[in-house]
Image (tube, helix red, strand yellow):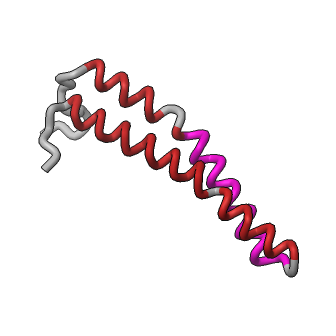
């Protein structure tokens, strides 16, 4: 079995759609990661209002993280469908 090559693509349009969906997920994931890291640092180091700001930053990281996760899941489904593999 050749590990370096993937299965042949049965639906090239779905493969392109998969790449098109996965590409914008990277900036959303980076934004979410930066917000979480800054929020955790503020939680660990800060006190009083700085601690609350850390919690707010962590909460604000949720929507971009969910968008990135949704785009990655849609890209995975599109790629899976392009290879005509069954889902169940």
Q: Nearer the viewer, residue 70 or 15?
A: 70
Determine which quarter of the picture holds residue 10: top left
At a point 59% along the width and 57% down the height, the residue shown is 62
At a point 53% along the width and 34% down the height, the residue shown is 24
Decide if residue 20 is on the left or right side of residue 55.
left
The number of discs equals: 0
Q: Is residue 81 above or below residue 88?
A: above
Q: Nearer the viewer, residue 5 or 71?
A: 71
Decide if residue 45 is on the left or right side of residue 81.
right
Decide if residue 76 is on the left or right side of residue 3.
right
Q: Is residue 49 above or below residue 87?
A: below
Q: Nearer the viewer, residue 8 or 67?
A: 67
Extent of the magenta region: 26-46
User: Where's the N terminus, which quadrant?
Assistant: top left
Q: Magenta region's main secondary structure?
A: helix
Determine which quarter of the picture holds residue 27: top right
Q: Is residue 35 above or below residue 21?
A: below
Q: Position of residue 43 (x, y in %)?
A: 76, 75
28 inside magenta stretch: yes
At a point 29% along the width and 19% down the height, the residue shown is 13
Q: Position of residue 14 (x, y in %)?
A: 29, 25
Q: Position of residue 61 (x, y in %)?
A: 64, 56
Q: Is residue 36 above or below residue 10?
A: below
Q: Residue furthest bottom?
A: 47
């Amino acid at each position: 079995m050749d590990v370096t090559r993937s299965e042949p693509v049965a639906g090239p349009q779905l493969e392109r759609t998969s790449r098109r969906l996965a590409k914008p997920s990277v900036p959303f994931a980076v934004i979410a990661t930066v917000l979480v890291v800054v929020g955790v640092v503020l939680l660990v180091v800060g006190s009083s209002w700085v601690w609350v700001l850390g919690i707010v930053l962590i909460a604000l990281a949720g929507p971009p993280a969910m968008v990135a996760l949704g785009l990655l899941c849609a890209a995975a489904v599109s790629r899976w469908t392009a290879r005509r593999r069954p889902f169940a």
